[in-house]
Image (tube, helix red, strand yellow):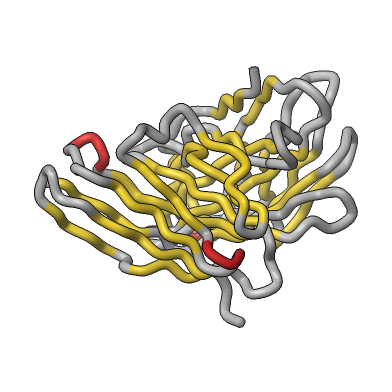
Amino acid sequence: GNSVTQMEGPVTLSEEAFLTINCTYTATGYPSLFWYVQYPGEGLQLLLKATKADDKGSNKGFEATYRKETTSFHLEKGSVQVSDSAVYFCALSVLSGDSSYKLIFGSGTRLLVRP
Amino acid sequence: DTGVSQDPRHKITKRGQNVTFRCDPISEHNRLYWYRQTLGQGPEFLTYFQNEAQLEKSRLLSDRFSAERPKGSFSTLEIQRTEQGDSAMYLCASSFMTSGRDEQYFGPGTRLTVT
């Protein structure tokens, strides 16, 4: 079946530190991979995506590379800010059933950045 | 268009009561998904519509749950005879297929508390 595993949190960093949040997946077919971010009290926002092997998604200083050989999509940022404090979800989608591309999410990783 | 909207944002109800949530997708999006998110977990897929047709339902969607999307516009999710285990955030997402890929945009969610 399809599943996503991401590192447990919380991850606590000082401002300007380097961030890595690990994500690995299991999928049938050829999934697209996503990182979503959820700020307190808000819905999910798409942070970045990659649709095929070796693609790199990037946005707002965050990056993730689709690694088919290791079935991974780790999220990185070179220098985090306090405003990056949020919960980050790794997700995959693959065509299933009648044209559905439902998302399969990991359990989320809470990031807390201290000034 | 300001994105996906959901109403109400919060709902408190007593066990055994019926509740209905509404989702208004981005106007040009023909695909609509419902997810449920419990505390500390990632969202889980409930059901999927393409236009007005409900094409996929999760096993999580018991007989007490029903969803509709009349005329392929807004969607409603109704829960009958609510139970405490139904307490969760209910998320709606809409999308439009481009280049063979599906990118989902989420609403802010409806938080349901069953007392």
Name which residue lies at 22% across and 60% down.
B11
Is A111 in front, or is B51? B51
Question: Residue A6 appears in which quarter of the rendering?
Answer: top right
Vertically, is A18 above or below B68? Answer: above
* Coordinates of residue B27 in the picture (x, y in percent): 64, 75
Vertically, is A77 above or below B1? Answer: above
Name which residue lies at 61% across and 64% down.
B72
Vertically, is A52 above or below B96? Answer: above
* Coordinates of residue B63 in the picture (x, y in percent): 35, 34
Image quadrant containing the C terminus of chain A: bottom left
Is B23 in front, or is B64? B64
In the figure, is residue B101 to the left or right of A86? right
Residue A45 in view in this figure:
no
Outermost residue, bottom direction?
B1
* Coordinates of residue B74 in the picture (x, y in percent): 51, 67
Image quadrant containing the N terminus of chain A: top right
